[in-house]
Image (cartoon, rainbow, N blue to C red):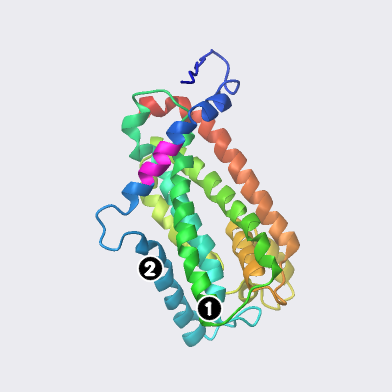
Amino acid sequence: MTKHRIVIEPNSKNTNYWKDLWNYRGLFYFLSWRDVLVRYKQTALGVIWSVLRPLITIVVFTLVFNKLGHFPTEGGVPYAIMVCAGMLPWQFFSNAFSESAGSLVANSNLLTKVYFPRLIVPASSVIVSIIDFLISFIILLGLFFFYQYIPGWRMMLLPVFFLLATVTSMGAGLFIAALNVKYRDFRYVIPFIVQFGLYISPVGFSSNVVYGNTSWAIGLKYLYSLNPMVGVIDGFRWAIIGGDTQLFLPGFVLSVLVSLLLLAYGIIYFRKTERTFADII
């Protein structure tokens, strides 16, 4: 049996912390598996909810934006596929962000009893959302079969954009999780952030609808790209739809930078306030 020695030294913030993350990987697996088991416990439909929720949203968005609003599709694909290409990353982000943001408060009894790197708690919450994403990906495959659509080589780059979605949700989740420990008002703010983010992200429509053909469209593209989920969703659509779909590369780079800055600041703020969690919570 392998034994690990935990060294706690004064004025040593990072020397042993990242080693502890590896040493406590068993706890990470345990918390992740526990959340997976509890997620749909005592529900009649179980994991079917992972498919049913985004499917209903895709149907509603297709009816509202395409059938009633006559919004154009992108790349000549059926509108349902375009919406699904935006809904899957958004559903993952909203679930991962919400779960990680409230994870510390939900595990308050664990935080006050034993030492372990608190970063494990919100990180393990994201694993459940990854599993939900993989299950809900069946919807996209079903739409491919229904519309007899064959994606191109760009689909091979989809994991890159999924990694970007993970970075974005983790960065935002760590920052709000740390704030939620001290200010419990954020349990009311989190649903508002998710709902507002859905409105300002190109989930049910193409980004080209927002940009338009105005003389200041370029400036609007850069401004809109400050929302990191714009780069994620546009990247998903570029990979899934293919064809003549274009990715606004400068805006995508800007979204990537915002996501990386969000992750860096989330980790820094989380580590800065981590030592007070057990006392406040």
Q: Viewer-proximal residue, 80 or 253?
A: 80
Instruction: Give residue 193's mark.
Output: none
- Magenta segment, which residues? 29-35
Seen at 49% across and 41% down, the residue is: 123
Tell me the mark number nearer the camera, choosing from 2 and 1: 1
Seen at 43% across and 26% down, the residue is: 276
What residue is disc 2 on?
A: 52
Crowding at dot 2, Cα within 10 Å, few <14 / some 14-19 / many 20+, comes out as some
Instruction: State the image coordinates of residue 228 (x, y, percent, origin top left).
Output: 61, 56
First along the sequence among labels 2 and 1: 2
Answer whether residue 272 is visible to the viewer in this image.
yes
Magenta residues: mostly which secondary structure?
helix
Amino acid marked by disc 2: Leu
Amino acid marked by disc 1: Phe
What residue is disc 1 on?
A: 145
Instruction: State how far apart marks 2 and 1 are (Cα).
Output: 18 Å
